[in-house]
Amino acid sequence: MLLHLQTWQEVEAYLAKSTAIIIPIGSTEQHGPNGLIGTDAICGEAVGRKLGETTGTLVAPTIAVGMAQHHLAFPGSMTLRPSTLIAVVKDNVESLARHGFTHFYFVNGHGGNVAPFSSAFSELYAESSLSRPGNRPPIRCVLRNWYETPKVKAISRELYADQEGSHATPSEVSLTWAVYPQTVKHMKMEPKVAPRGTFTDAADYRRNFPDGRIGSNPDLASIEAGQRLWDAAVADLADDLASFVKLKA
Ligand code: NI
């Protein structure tokens, strides 16, 4: 059930039986030589939407541009400043909370989003804490990285071991290929496995990781692996979501 394909009466009827909503989040940034610019948003959206289908939970529009300042030296990458992203998250949550949504389940595809989202959740809770008791409806937010669920990690380890890396990984590239099979691209990676290391700003990132990858060999990606990873993420998150909605807001 996708929020943008409902009428307002249908949303009102949904709220009478559930006040939980899934919000897919990602990033729009370079993903190495054969990865799509939209990889993180595509992955968050694919997992979030299938999770919604499986569990009968409403799914909000994807927040597709995240905090990716370190990728800006590569064409096509986009970012929100951390402070902008925090404001975007707050406004999205508060719009929905006004209608009575209480449980916000963010399915994330991008590591750079974790810190700003954590700050956004603290800002939202701070506003409740600082207002007179009962003046604001209580809410609860959580963020889950699809690529870190136990079943997903086991498959990534089994298939890619030390060639998984941490950016432009064969796992995330596989998932995008399962969603958009017409985008499959195989090519020789040079070096086969990208270097590892740290970065600060966009220029530093490109100096350290010239083709955009970190520690990965995404030429190992496949549609079949993507389908397995997709199903595994949804299975793990369905259990987690069921526990989350039982928590008091
Ligand atoms: Ni990614």
Image (cartoon, rainbow, N blue to C red):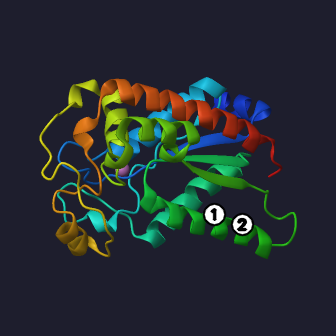
Mark 2, ligand 1, within 8 Å: the answer is: no
Q: Quadrant of residue 200?
A: bottom left
Q: Is residue 1 visible?
A: no
Q: Nearer the viewer, residue 4 or 23?
A: 23
Q: Which mark is residue 94?
A: none
Instruction: Kindly indicate the quadrant of the structure image that contains residue 16.
Output: top right
Mark 1–mark 2 distance (CA, rounded to whole Å): 6 Å
- Badge count: 2
Look at 75% across and 35% down and name the residue there: 18
User: Dot 2: what SS?
Assistant: helix
| Residue depicted at 85% across the width and 72% down the height | 132
SS category of the residue bearing label 1: helix
Residue at the right extreme of this rendering: 133
**Kind of residue sitting beneath label 1:** Phe
What label does residue 121 carry, if any?
1
Q: Position of residue 112 (x, y in %)?
A: 43, 62
Residue at 73 percent across and 44 percent down: it is 244
Q: Amino acid at mark 2?
A: Tyr
Q: Which residue corresponds to mark 2?
A: 125
Residue 209 in picture, x, y percent from top left: 21, 63
Residue 13 lies left or right of residue 175; in this view the side is right
Q: Residues within 10 Å of mark 1 (few under 14, many from 20)?
A: some
Q: Is residue 209 left or right of residue 19?
A: left
Residue 35 position, x and y percent, is: 24, 43
| Along the viewing direction, whichever of 247 and 15 lies nearer the viewer | 247
Tag 1–tag 2 contact (CB < 8 Å): yes
**Does the image show residue 145?**
yes
Q: Quadrant of the N terminus?
A: top right
**Above or below, comparing residue 3 to residue 79 in the picture:** above
Using a 10 Å C-alpha cutoff, classify the residue at mark 2 as few (fewer than 14 neighbours), some (14 to 19) or many (20 or more): some
In terms of depth relative to the viewer, which is nearer, 232 or 24?
Answer: 232
Horizontal and vertical percent position of residue 70: 30, 67
